[in-house]
Amino acid sequence: LVNQLPEANLILLRHLFGVLHHIEQNSGVNQMNAFNLALCIAPNMLWLPSPTGPEEETQSTKKVALLVQFLIENSGEIFGGDIASLF
């Protein structure tokens, strides 16, 4: 699916998840593992298209957080092994 994104979107995601992966690699110092990063960033990445109740929003946020956590933990395989070279 990632390869089907427009080039500009792919570049943006590569850089975003490159930064998040780099932060996660230093979680021993900064306490920001992939789970914590996902909880912080997920609500800003994807949301439901129409207003819903708090329960639906909570469930949606949890699903997005799991997706973001997966993308952070597997960013090298998803966006290319040279993701560290972005820095």
Image: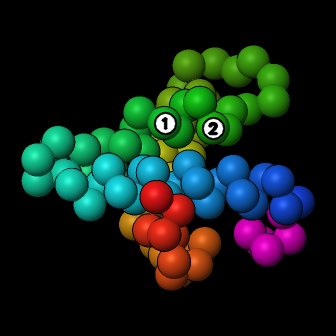
Number of callouts: 2
Q: Main secondary structure of the magenta part?
A: helix
The residue located at (62%, 60%) in the rendering is: 14
Q: Residue at x 70, y 21 (%)?
A: 52
Image quarter of residue 21: bottom left
The residue labelled by disc 2 is 45
Distance, label 1 to label 2, CA atoms, is 7 Å
The one nearer the camera, 83 or 56, is 83
Callout 1 amino acid: Ile
Residue 31 vertical position relative to residue 34 in the rendered view, above or below = above
Query: What is the quadrant of residue 26 in the picture?
Result: bottom left
Name the spot of residue 19 as percent of width and height, x first: 45, 51
Magenta segment, which residues? 1-5
* Figure check: 56 above or below 51: below
Left or right side of 84 for 14: right
Residue 23 in percent (x, y) is at: 32, 50
Q: Is residue 67 visible?
A: no
Which residue corresponds to mark 1?
41
x and y percent of residue 50 in the render? 81, 23
Quadrant of residue 37 within the rendered picture = top left
The vertical placement of 44 against 81, above or below, is above
**What amino acid type is highlighted by mark number 2?**
Met
Please say if the residues under marks 1 and 2 sit with CB atoms less than 8 Å apart: yes
Q: Residue at x 35, y 57 (%)?
A: 22
User: Quick one: SS at disc 2?
Assistant: helix
